[in-house]
Image: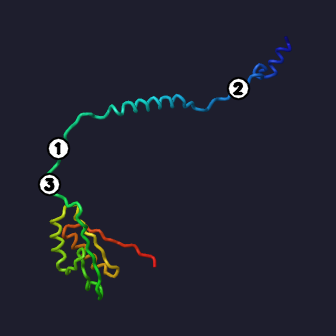
Amino acid sequence: MAMNMAGSAGGGGGGRRGRRRAAVMAEINVTPMVDVMLVLLIIFMVAAPLMTSTIDIDLPVAGGGKQLQANAPPLTLSVKRTGGACNSNVELYLGDTLIPANELLPKITAIKETRSEAERVVYLRGDKDVCYTDMMKLLGYIRTAGFKANIVIVPEQGS
């Protein structure tokens, strides 16, 4: 008996020495989640066609209001410098028509009355030699007439 007590007291737990610890499983089992997702998919695939309405309704056609010009060409104002210093001679082209500078404001004001709100845009194209002050005057005329202005810029071409 003395040997048994000495072996168990001095050995530090001889009974534990033979057992090994099992490794902790650190993975998530995704199989139940996949099963649930497949069941939900089948439910939605069956229920989606049932959610459509089969009642035939004859909806009224909206009428009235202004008739919009579907393919009205955009209004372009082209500016070309004819010579001299800034604030000098420029040629103005409304579309393809040459017009004097003093007739620009009355003409675009008259054009504004024939266009809808969405079509009230003027594309302003300026020659590279036109002075900044001339372009700003034209922008002022366009805004005074009630149009929005878009300045057309053409990128430089490589020579």
Q: Which of the two discs, 2 and 1, sits closer to the camera?
A: 1
- Label whose residue precedes the other's in the sequence (2 or 3): 2
Q: Position of residue 15 (x, y in %)?
A: 77, 19
Q: Name the image quarter holding residue 5.
A: top right
Q: Which of the two discs, 1 and 3, sits closer to the camera?
A: 1
The residue carrying mark 3 is 65
Mark 3 residue type: Gly
Furthest toward the top, the residue is 1
Furthest toward the left, the residue is 64
The residue carrying mark 1 is 60
Residue depicted at 24% across the width and 74% down the height: 95
Mark 1 residue type: Pro
Q: Position of residue 113 (x, y in %)?
A: 15, 66
- Label whose residue precedes the other's in the sequence (1 or 3): 1
* Image-based side of 11 in relation to 27, left or right: right
Residue depicted at 32% across the width and 79% down the height: 127
* Residue density around tag 2, few if under 14, some if 14–19, many if 20 or more, within 10 Å: few
Residue depicted at 19% across the width and 76% down the height: 104
Q: Secondary structure at mark 1?
A: loop
Q: Please tell me whether residue 86 is drawn above or below residue 105 in the rendered image.
A: below
